[in-house]
């Protein structure tokens, strides 16, 4: 049976190559989110631009789940890598878990997470999720196997999602130490993963590294390279997708 995969990105530039290659046609702009759809040999592909930030990403993802009932949601775009991760510009990173890293309470004694204050963000099937949201291990394994087959470096690990990204090496260092050695930071991934978890939809996140988490210097960034490599890999991933049932973590 044909299944549906949804691809989301914060900006049009992060999925423009996929739109051109797959030939998606505009479906609607409900909620102000432009959405395109196309049929492929592997199934139906829906692509959407969510806008930047967690609120936009969460609203768009909920709308896409309600309207299109996907079996898999892929979140993509660019990210800033922590220097300790060993990632460099243009490398690809895959999220095994997404963290809302600046949602909690900042006290004199240090930062308190949702778990520290005893309030879960999501309760599902007897499980309580606080600031960390797992992504589909089955989809992740398929992506890692494909990367190995293609000779592409794809590093997996923890991602941080922030409302305020790090513009200094010092803030990045504090976040890295507090969060347990994450790979990179972004502004939407945890919102997509959290909503996907609520709907019981498998979620995959792959991003290209556009910059390092250091003192902000746009001259050292390479967004086009990061986006191109992420899109090219996902185009191949989607082409190889055969609608296998991808179980949402619970």
Image (cartoon, helix red, strand yellow):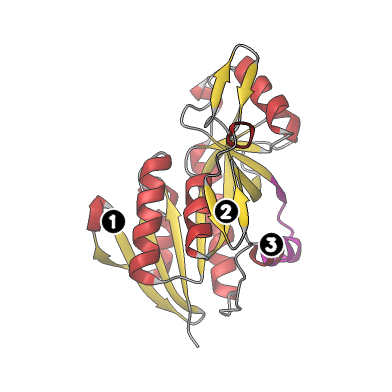
Q: Which corner quadrant of the image does residue 67 belong to?
A: bottom left
Q: Position of residue 34 (x, y in %)?
A: 28, 56
Q: Residue at point 45% right, 70% down?
A: 70
Residue under numbered circle 2: 205
Disc 1 crowd rating (10 Å Cα; few below 14, some 14-19, many 20+) is some
Q: Position of residue 195 (x, y in %)?
A: 47, 54
Residue under numbered circle 1: 34
**Callout 3 secondary element:** helix
Q: What range of the chain is rendered magenta?
A: 142-157
Magenta-drawn stretch contains 226? no
Tell me if I can see residue 134 in this picture: no
| Placement of 112 over or under 45, stated as above or below | above
Distance (Cα) linking label 1 and label 3 = 29 Å
Q: Position of residue 32 (x, y in %)?
A: 24, 51
Tell me if I can see residue 187 in this picture: yes
Q: Which mark is residue 137?
A: 3
| Placement of 83 over or under 109, stated as above or below | below
Q: Nearer the viewer, mark 2 or mark 3?
A: 3
């Amino acid at each position: 049976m044909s299944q549906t995969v949804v691809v989301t990105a914060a900006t049009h530039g992060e999925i423009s190559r996929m739109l051109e290659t797959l030939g998606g046609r505009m479906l609607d702009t409900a909620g102000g989110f432009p959405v395109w759809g196309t049929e492929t040999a592997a199934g139906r592909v829906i692509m959407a631009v969510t806008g930047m930030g967690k609120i936009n990403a969460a609203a768009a993802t909920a709308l896409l789940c309600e309207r299109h009932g996907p079996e898999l949601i892929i979140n993509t775009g660019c990210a800033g890598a922590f220097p300790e991760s060993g990632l460099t510009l243009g490398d690809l990173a895959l999220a095994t878990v997404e963290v809302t890293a600046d949602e909690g309470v900042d006290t004199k004694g240090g930062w308190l997470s949702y778990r520290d204050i005893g309030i879960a963000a999501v309760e599902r099937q007897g499980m309580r999720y606080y600031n960390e949201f797992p992504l589909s291990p089955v989809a992740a394994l398929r992506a890692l196997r494909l990367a190995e087959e293609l000779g592409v470096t794809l590093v997996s690990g923890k991602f941080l999602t922030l409302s305020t990204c790090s513009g200094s090496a010092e803030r990045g260092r504090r976040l890295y130490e507090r969060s347990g050695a994450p790979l990179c930071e972004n502004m939407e991934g945890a919102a997509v993963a959290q909503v996907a978890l609520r709907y019981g939809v498998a979620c995959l996140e792959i991003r290209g590294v556009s910059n390092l988490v250091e003192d902000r210097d746009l001259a050292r960034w390479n967004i086009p390279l990061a986006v191109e490599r992420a899109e090219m890999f996902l185009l191949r991933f989607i082409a190889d997708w055969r609608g296998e049932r991808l179980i949402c973590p619970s």
